[in-house]
Amino acid sequence: MTCVWSAALVGVSGVAIEVEVRLSSQLPRVDVVGLPEAAVRESVSRIRGAIASAGWTFPDRRATVNLAPAELRKSGAGLDLPMAIGILGAAGLIGPDRLAGRAFFGELALDGRLRGTRGTLAAVLAMRDAGAREAIIPWTSLRRARHAPGIRILGAPDLKTVVAHLLGEEKLAPADESPDDPAPIEEVPGPCLSEIRGQPLAKRALEIAAAGGHGLLLTGPPGTGKTLLARRLPGLLPPLRGEARLEAFCVLDASGAVAPEAPMSDAPPFRAPHHSASAAGLLGGGHPIRPGEVSLAHHGVLFLDELPEFDRRCLESLREVIEQGVVRIARANLRCELPARFQLVAAANPCPCGFHGTPGRDCRCDDATLARYRRRISGPLLDRIDLGVTVGEVPWSVLRAPDDGPTSEIVRNRVARARERQRRRGGRGSLNAAIPDAQLEELVRATPKALSLLGRAVEGLRLSARSTRRLLRVARTIADLAEADSTDHEAIAEALQLRPTW
Ligand SMILES: Nc1ncnc2c1ncn2[C@@H]1O[C@H](COP(=O)(O)OP(=O)(O)OP(=O)(O)O)[C@@H](O)[C@H]1O
Ligand SMILES: [Mg+2]
């Protein structure tokens, strides 16, 4: 019997798979056991084609291919290559010593070429964690897989080359030396914040949101720049690094939304699903399971424009996702967790006609319509958004002025400094938006004057315990932007001004 290591994709994570192949002297046929899905069962036809194209004869005996662990449903075509290697190994072409410490992942074409599939990066990580020292994958996937640390990654064009490598007849180039080695990804400058005229309060809110990772709700009449503002948030955020970058890449790679050979950007993801998005599109699901928009926004920004127009049930499910940072999918025979830790930015008109509460404008909505519209965003969802700002109409004199306010680059530098302070204070990856309740007092370090202002506000505005804590987190970020160790009353006052209202 021959054993070959590989991996299968479940959601966006890889699971190590052991491919066992045994030949027996019965009528020639191939049985694949161990819960293979359609694409895996079809592997056999591709493997036959690939083996024939390479000039070898397919074993003229009964081949049983077992995919372990047996209770896990295996999907995807990445198991083609390990199954082919297993069959060739069982037939005596490749000795078991040649397979030790190696793992394989890739789809085969009928002519033996290797094709990249979605999920290669997650598969390589799973094979590494299972103890493989070398991963052999299609060379078109190298660009993607080379982000996986701690394992030697080799890319091959076809089955024949893989076998030649295993037999020591040919050397495959490792990912970091491959001729196709991609140049470092250039930062494409996004649209600049200074292109937006006026709206100083909204820009400030955007800066605070970027600095502390806070959720932000932009409300206001149509055509005032809400969408423009939200789209500039990614340009204010620092590039992805380390573990966060790898996690975000894994999700994107596993989603199949980008071609395997396309380069990935260090910029945090920005996802803006349309309000007609289905629950599966937004939260993930399907068969096999694919990540939804909330996961594609992992470590980046999820922008929900026209928030009240989203399906109510989707919005309610979103609450739980925001709280837990994952989407949990539970099916009879499959459970998986899709990571979804994102920063939420939402935009909404104040009412269906768009002008409720806008100075100098008449709202045409009747009370019942208004009440219905307001109910579309529930209190509990709103409770999970830290910042809110009304984006008002911009006077013509301001609109026709040249570029206005700080550029995205200036703000990005301020944000980076504020984030560095948070990192030093709270350890790796900790943002003010995620300060646990238990640590709030110790980290916020409110001055006595700040505390007395907060006390008055809590009484006067009847703030709930949760709103009060949110306010303290925002105030902490404001203090960080001011490079202050303690949070003073001015930070509290500004945080009060930027409370979300609906
Ligand atoms: N403050 C601004 N500075 C410069 N241009 C602006 C500003 N506000 C709006 N515009 C112009 O108006 C257009 C519409 O802006 P935007 O889509 O951001 O509005 P909105 O507030 O999202 O409106 P809606 O509520 O209808 O979605 C922009 O493409 C831009 O050309
Ligand atoms: Mg808009």
Image (spheres, grey):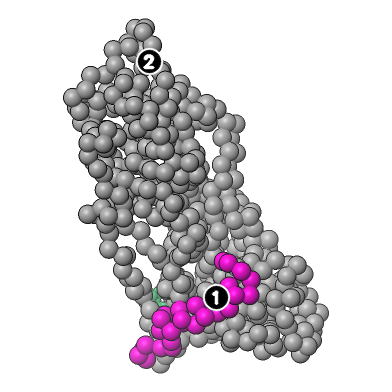
Helix, strand or loop: magenta stretch: helix
The verdict on label 2 being within 8 Å of ligand 2 is: no
Q: Residue 436: x, y in percent?
A: 70, 66
Give the percent coordinates (x, y) of residue 411.
46, 82
* Residue 147 sits above or below residue 120 on the image: below
Q: Amino acid at mark 1?
A: Arg
Identify whether 330 is placed above or below 19.
Answer: below
Q: Tell whether position 434 is magenta.
A: no
The residue depicted at 68 percent of the width and 63 percent of the height is 379
Q: Which residue is mark 2?
A: 23
Residue bearing mark 1 = 419
The tag earlier along the polypeptide, 1 or 2, is: 2
Q: SS of the residue at dot 2?
A: strand
Q: Secondary structure at mark 1?
A: helix
The image quadrant where one finds the N terminus is top left
Looking at the rendering, the stretch of residues picked out in magenta corresponds to 400-429
Q: Residues within 10 Å of mark 1 (few under 14, many from 20)?
A: many
Q: Amino acid at mark 2?
A: Leu
Q: Decide: marks 1, 2 in contact (CB < 8 A)?
A: no
Q: Quadrant of residue 53?
A: top left
